[in-house]
Image (tube, rainbow, N blue to C red):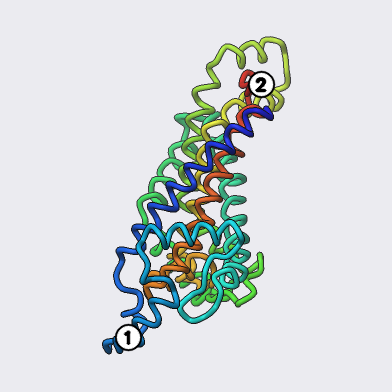
């Protein structure tokens, strides 16, 4: 196991460099960030030249990337065009989005797996058909429609929640936004669990466990569910980074100042330092999440061993 972890960590280095290089190149072709600072008016040539020199934009792109990566390994993600260090923006945005992501993942794991187990054990029955139709509707409806509808009904008409989330973004305030963020993924988790449970239910090891006289709940939890969770864990692991980076719509609807909000503002204002810095951290989140998923395989399935 130790060798496998070291090998995976070494493999993550070129992946991280390649991903950040592509991001850096794509962000730098968005347009002239200095021109965006001046608004509708054209920047004074002397002022524009001074700003480009100050932010290192007068250097070749490859040199900018090398300088940026060297600073990243020291914990310096650059400075936004408003003079605020990107690390300060991360310090306020990431805790909010992490709490929102935890709420969303909790909905996926608890609600999605429970519904998947129930429908997988009752395949073809009315409850199975109803859940399948419901998940199909959830997948078909865009997230911004779901968010605005829940905000209108629960916040404006019925008054159950505050339509806008406070600046602290406490866990209690993030229940509805977390549900909106997790809605599509929750539907996929339900369907994945249902399919995996239905397939493994006919496996020989399940029949053997039943023939031995094991209690039904033990057969389901210790044998059937454990082996059926591998595709679900794979999906949830890759979905963590997607939820953190794809929360732009949800955070805009509920006025949450998290990672999605900062990315939106950075793209809107062509603030390359902010966009590249936040996406660099999200790349690390993806890599770590995939490593944890691979390690969980050995926990869920005893047949899997890493040398």
Q: Is residue 144 above or below residue 210?
A: below
Q: Is residue 44 above or below residue 204?
A: below
Residue 230 vs residue 29, the one in the foreground: 29
Q: Is residue 260 left or right of residue 220?
A: left
Question: Residue at (34%, 86%) from the top-left corner?
Answer: 38
Residue 63 vs residue 15, the one in the foreground: 63
Label 1: which residue?
A: 39
Judged from the image, the secondary structure of the residue bearing numbered disc 2 is loop
Question: Residue at (56%, 28%) from the top-left corner?
Answer: 228
Residue 184 picture location, percent across and down:
45, 50
Question: Residue at (46%, 72%) from the top-left corner?
Answer: 152
Q: Is residue 61 left or right of residue 16?
A: left
Q: Is residue 273 left or right of residue 75?
A: left
Question: Residue at (39%, 64%) from the top-left corner?
Answer: 145
Q: Is residue 220 above or below residue 180?
A: above
Residue 246 vs residue 116, the one in the foreground: 246
Residue 192 picture location, percent across and down:
48, 35
Label 2: which residue?
A: 302
Judged from the image, the secondary structure of the residue bearing numbered disc 1 is loop
Foreground tag (1 vs 2): 1
- Kindly identify which numbered label has been placed on residue 132: none
- Mark pair 1, 2: CA separation: 60 Å
Position of the C terminus, as image quadrant, is top right
Residue 194 picture location, percent across and down:
50, 33
Give whichever of discs 1 and 2 has the lower sequence position: 1
Count residues near mark 2 (Cα–Cα under 10 Å), then give few for <14, some for 14-19, many for 20+: few
């Amino acid at each position: 196991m130790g060798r496998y972890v070291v090998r995976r960590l070494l493999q993550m280095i070129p992946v991280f460099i390649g991903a950040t290089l592509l991001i850096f190149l794509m962000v730098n072709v968005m347009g002239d960030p200095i021109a965006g600072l001046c608004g509708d008016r054209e920047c004074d040539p002397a002022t524009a030249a001074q700003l480009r020199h100050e932010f290192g934009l007068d250097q070749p792109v490859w040199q900018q990337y090398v300088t940026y990566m060297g600073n990243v390994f020291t914990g310096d993600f650059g400075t936004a065009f408003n003079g605020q260090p990107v690390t300060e923006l991360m310090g306020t945005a990431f805790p909010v989005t992490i709490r929102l992501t935890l709420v969303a993942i909790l909905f996926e794991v608890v609600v999605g797996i429970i519904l998947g187990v129930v429908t997988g054990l009752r395949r073809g029955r009315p409850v199975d058909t109803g859940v399948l139709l419901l998940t199909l509707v959830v997948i078909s409806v865009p997230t911004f429609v779901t968010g605005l509808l829940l905000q209108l009904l629960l916040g404006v008409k019925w008054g159950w929640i505050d339509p806008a989330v406070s600046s602290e973004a406490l866990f209690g305030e993030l229940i509805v936004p977390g549900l909106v963020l997790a809605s599509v993924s929750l539907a996929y988790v339900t369907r994945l669990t249902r399919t995996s449970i239905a397939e493994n239910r006919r496996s020989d090891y399940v029949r053997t466990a039943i023939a031995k006289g094991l209690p039904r709940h033990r057969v389901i939890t210790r044998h059937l569910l454990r082996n059926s969770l591998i595709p679900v864990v794979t999906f949830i692991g890759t979905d963590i980074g997607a939820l953190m980076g794809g929360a732009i719509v949800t955070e805009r609807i509920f006025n949450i100042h998290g990672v999605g909000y900062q990315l939106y503002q950075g793209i809107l204002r062509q603030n390359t330092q902010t966009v590249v810095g936040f996406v660099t951290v999200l790349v690390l989140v993806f890599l770590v999440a995939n490593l944890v998923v691979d390690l969980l395989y050995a926990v869920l399935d005893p047949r899997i061993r890493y040398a």
